[in-house]
Amino acid sequence: MGHLFRYLPQQSGYNKRLRHAAELIKNVIRVLATDTTLWTDDLWVIDSPPVECGRSRETTKRSDLAGWAQYGYCASHSRYFWGLRLHLVCTLGGLPVAFALTGAKADERQTLLEIFTADPTPVHNRPGQTLIADKNYYGKAFERDLIEAGVELLRPTRKNEPERPGARLFKPLRQTIESINQTFKAQLDLERHGGRTPAGAIVRVLQRVLALTAAIWHNDKTEQPVMRSLTAYDH
């Protein structure tokens, strides 16, 4: 009966168009972020929340993400997962400044240095920018590289180390970091991204980063009391 229908819809081209838009999404994230009052904040935080990509053993063997996605451990929730990590540098208000998506076992320190090397714009002409991180971001050579990039690192004291400055700040700020992560996980469904290939996973994570950036931009322009609030868009 095909001759009775002038047009038969085929498989949706949305996924193909979405994958081709990854670079455009990155550019829009930066344009919106730099157009907010939060962009000039002199205090950043960094964390690497998990991006789960599958749970069954068969998925880990057959998925196109195998080889990039890895088994990792999430200390915040005391669980293992198979997937990626979103290394996210953001302001205390939750505005994404810089980010990278890596395998779950990627070295967090090396990834952070590569973020600033690949895109030095956020730290350019910002001497004394402060970055708060957890205990995994340690090492004299690592901290020296950050200082050369213009970033001062604050982190909790590790065992067998003398007391580091700013220790009293970390407990309340840790809750802030977890709150930002929860926005991605709960309201923006970070771990339900649905990507089945590297290109698909990347662009779907970028979608979440763009959604949060756009919400903060809108709340900033409309002078809302809470910049990171997604209540008006959470339907």
Image (cartoon, rainbow, N blue to C red):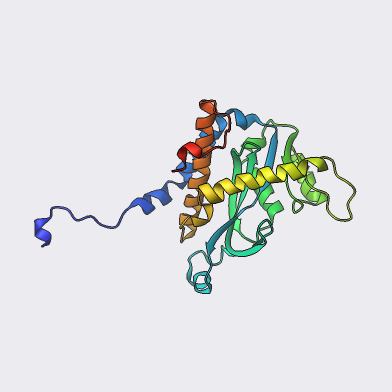
> Is 160 left, or right, of 132 in this rendering?
right
> Is 38 left, or right, of 209 in this rendering?
right
Residue at 38% in and 53% down: 15
User: Closest to the observer: 75 or 113?
Assistant: 75
Residue 71, quarter of the rendered image: bottom right
User: Closest to the observer: 72 or 202?
Assistant: 72
The relative height of residue 52 versus residue 17 in the rendered view (above or below) is: below
> Is 214 left, or right, of 123 in this rendering?
left
Residue at 77% in and 52% down: 135
Residue at 58% in and 33% down: 226
Image coords of residue 67 (percent x, y): 56, 66
Residue at 69% in and 58% down: 75
On the question of residue 118 being in view, the answer is no
On the question of residue 122 being in view, the answer is yes
Name the quarter where the N terminus is drawn: bottom left
Image coords of residue 128 (percent x, y): 75, 33
Image coords of residue 44 (percent x, y): 68, 39
